[in-house]
C-alpha cells in the first residue's frame, strides 16, 4: 500500500486544525499501513433546505479526508434535528416535523455530492434517525444517561448562558441534545467502525462527550466480559482508538460575521444563492481574508497558494488572488460551466454588454438591483427615456433626466442612448426585460408583460 497523505499536516498548514483529542495518536491511527482506510464522520443537523457557507468548513474537512485516502461519512441529523442543538442559540429552537426535516435533508444532499463526489462510492451518507428513533426512553436513561454528569453538562457554555438568563432558560429537550449527539459517535463506533469525528470548534464539547461515552461503554463491556470469564475486573485495559478533531470557526479579518452580505446569508445551493452571487462573494474578499480563505475553501496545493500570495503582494491591484479564489471555490460547489457563466456575467456587467447573457444568468446578475414591472402594451408607440428615468428613480426630475441623457451617461441593455431614444418591443431582452444604466454603477431592471 502506498503511503497516505498526512491529513494532520495538510489541515494544519491550511489553518483547518484547532482541537484534537490526541494529535500524535490520531496521526499514527491514520497512517497505519496495516489497516484499511479509516472512517471519519461529520454531522449536520437539517435546519433549512440548504446549508450556509459556514457549514462548508466541515464538508471541506471531509473532502480532505477523502483526498488523504480515507472514507468520509456524512451524518444527517434526521433524529437530532427534531431536537435542536442549543450551541450558539440564545433562545429555544422551533421544533420541526419529521416531514419538514426530511425535506431539508433532501435539499442538502446535492451539496455533499458537489464537494465529495458520488454518494455510496466517494462518501457515505447516514441518517441518525435510523438508530435514534429505535432508542427507548428507558434504554436511553439506563445505558446512556448514567454515563453523563449533570454538573458537567451544566458547565457547557451554551447551557450556562441560557440558565443564567431567566427569560430564556433551556428546556430538558435541548439540554439532552448533547446526550443524543454523543450517542451518535458511540453507535457509529460500535456498529460501523467509525473512529473519528470532525467538526467546527463550537462542536468540540459535543465531540468530547461522544468520545467519553465510547470510553465508558467500552469499560462497561470489558468489565462484564471479565466478570463472565471469572477474570479480575478491577483493572481494565484497552486501546483507545477513537478521536475527535475540529477546525476553527472562520471569521473575517475586520471582525465582521463570515458569510453575511448586504442581501443576507451566503447559501450553498443555487436556488438560495446563485453561482454569480457566490462567485462575487469570494471576488469581493479583502486581501487579508483572501489569503486565509484560499487555503480553506480551495484544493490548491501549498506551493501554488504561496506563489499566488507572493504575486498578489507585488501587484494587489490585479486582484489575482481574489479571482483565483472565486474561480476555484465556485467550481468546487457549482461546477466549471456555472463558474464560467458567473465570470462572464461579471465581465458583462462591468462592460455593460449584458445582451450576450442567457436569461437565467441575466436574472442572477440583476437579482439584487431595483426592478419594476410595466405593461408591454405601453411600448406600442415607444416610451420616452425622460419619463422612464423618472419612473425608475434613476432621475429625480425631468430636468435631471434630460441632463443625464445629454451627457451620454444613460444606456439601455449596454448601448448608449440620447434624449431622442424611445423604448419599444425591439429593445426587450428575452422578450421581457430592459436594463437601464445611469453612470457606471447605477442599474435598474424593467420587466414587461
Image (spheres, grey):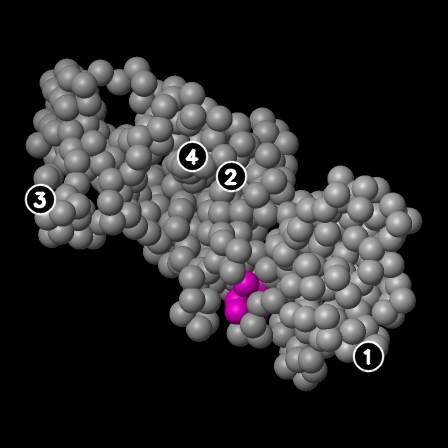
Horizontal side of residue 319 vs 102, given as left or right:
right
Q: Return the disc, 2 or 3, that comes first in the chain's sequence.
A: 2
Query: Which residue in the protein does label 2 denote?
Result: 50
**Residue 109 to residue 140: above or below:** below
The dominant secondary structure in magenta is helix
Looking at the rendered image, the disc whose residue lies closer to the viewer, 2 or 3, is 2
Crowding at mark 4 (Cα within 10 Å: few <14, some 14-19, many 20+) = many
Labels 1 and 2: the sequence-earlier one: 2
Judged from the image, the secondary structure of the residue bearing numbered disc 3 is helix
Q: Please state which of residues 448 and 429 is positioned toward the viewer in this rendering.
A: 448
Alpha-carbon distance for marks 4 and 1? 54 Å
Residue 434, position as x, y percentages in the image: 79, 53
Q: Residue 407 carries which label?
A: 1
Task: Give neighbour class at mark 3: few <14, some 14-19, many 20+ (Cα, 10 Å).
Answer: few
Q: Do the residues labelled 4 and 3 touch (CB within 8 Å)?
A: no
Q: What element carries label 2?
A: loop
- Identify the residue at horizontal 63%, vertical 32% (top origin): 118
Q: Are marks 1 and 2 in contact (CB under 8 Å)?
A: no
Which region is colored magenta?
A: 289-294
> Is tag 1's residue or tag 3's residue first in the polypeptide sequence?
3
Residue 446, percent across and down? 73, 52
Q: Distance between the residues labelled 4 and 3?
A: 29 Å
The Cα–Cα distance between marks 2 and 3, rounded to whole angstroms, is 36 Å
**How far is mark 2 from mark 4, CA to CA?**
8 Å
Residue 46 is tagged as: 4
The residue lying at 71 percent from left, 54 percent from top is 445
What is the spatial separation of the Cα atoms under label 1 and label 3, in whole angstroms?
73 Å
Amino acid at each position: 500500500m502506498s503511503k497516505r497523505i498526512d491529513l494532520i499536516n495538510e489541515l494544519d498548514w491550511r489553518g483547518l486544525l484547532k482541537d484534537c483529542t490526541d494529535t500524535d495518536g490520531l496521526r499514527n491511527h491514520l497512517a497505519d499501513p496495516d489497516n484499511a482506510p479509516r472512517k471519519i464522520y461529520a454531522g449536520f443537523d437539517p435546519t433549512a433546505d440548504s446549508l450556509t457557507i459556514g457549514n462548508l468548513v466541515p464538508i471541506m474537512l471531509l473532502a480532505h479526508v477523502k483526498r488523504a485516502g480515507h472514507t468520509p461519512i456524512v451524518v444527517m441529523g434526521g433524529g437530532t434535528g427534531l431536537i435542536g442543538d442549543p450551541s450558539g442559540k440564545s433562545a429555544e429552537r422551533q421544533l420541526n416535523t419529521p416531514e419538514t426535516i426530511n425535506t431539508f435533508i433532501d435539499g442538502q444532499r446535492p451539496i455533499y455530492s458537489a464537494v465529495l463526489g458520488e454518494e455510496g462510492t466517494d462518501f457515505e451518507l447516514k441518517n441518525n434517525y435510523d438508530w435514534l428513533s429505535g432508542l427507548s426512553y428507558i434504554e436511553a436513561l439506563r445505558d446512556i444517561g448514567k454515563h453523563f454528569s449533570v454538573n458537567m453538562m451544566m458547565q457547557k457554555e451554551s447551557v450556562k448562558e441560557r440558565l443564567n438568563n431567566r427569560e430564556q432558560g433551556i428546556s430538558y429537550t435541548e439540554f439532552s441534545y448533547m446526550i443524543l449527539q454523543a450517542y451518535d459517535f458511540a453507535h457509529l463506533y460500535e456498529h460501523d467502525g467509525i473512529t473519528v469525528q470532525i467538526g467546527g470548534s463550537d462542536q468540540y464539547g459535543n465531540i468530547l462527550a461522544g468520545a467519553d461515552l465510547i470510553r465508558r461503554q467500552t469499560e462497561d463491556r470489558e468489565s462484564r466480559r471479565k466478570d463472565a470469564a471469572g477474570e479480575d475486573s478491577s483493572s481494565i485495559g484497552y486501546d483507545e482508538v477513537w478521536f475527535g478533531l475540529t477546525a476553527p470557526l472562520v471569521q473575517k479579518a475586520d471582525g465582521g460575521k463570515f458569510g453575511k452580505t448586504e442581501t443576507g446569508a451566503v447559501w450553498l445551493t443555487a436556488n438560495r444563492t446563485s453561482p454569480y452571487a457566490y462567485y462575487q462573494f469570494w471576488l469581493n474578499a479583502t486581501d487579508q481574508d483572501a489569503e486565509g480563505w484560499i487555503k480553506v475553501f480551495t484544493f490548491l496545493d501549498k506551493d501554488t497558494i504561496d506563489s499566488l500570495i507572493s504575486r498578489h503582494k507585488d501587484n494587489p491591484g490585479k486582484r489575482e488572488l481574489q479571482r483565483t479564489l472565486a474561480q476555484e471555490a465556485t467550481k468546487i460547489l457549482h461546477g466549471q460551466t456555472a463558474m464560467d457563466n458567473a465570470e462572464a456575467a461579471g465581465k458583462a456587467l462591468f462592460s455593460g454588454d449584458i445582451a450576450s447573457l442567457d436569461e437565467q444568468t441575466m436574472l442572477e446578475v440583476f437579482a439584487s438591483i431595483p426592478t419594476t414591472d410595466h405593461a408591454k402594451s405601453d411600448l406600442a408607440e415607444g416610451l420616452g427615456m425622460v419619463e422612464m428615468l423618472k419612473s425608475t428613480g434613476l432621475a429625480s426630475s425631468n430636468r435631471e433626466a434630460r441632463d443625464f441623457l445629454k451627457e451620454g451617461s444613460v444606456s439601455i441593455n449596454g448601448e448608449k442612448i440620447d434624449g431622442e431614444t424611445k423604448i419599444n418591443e425591439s429593445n426587450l431582452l428575452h422578450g421581457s426585460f430592459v436594463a437601464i444604466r445611469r453612470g457606471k454603477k447605477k442599474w435598474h431592471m424593467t420587466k414587461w408583460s
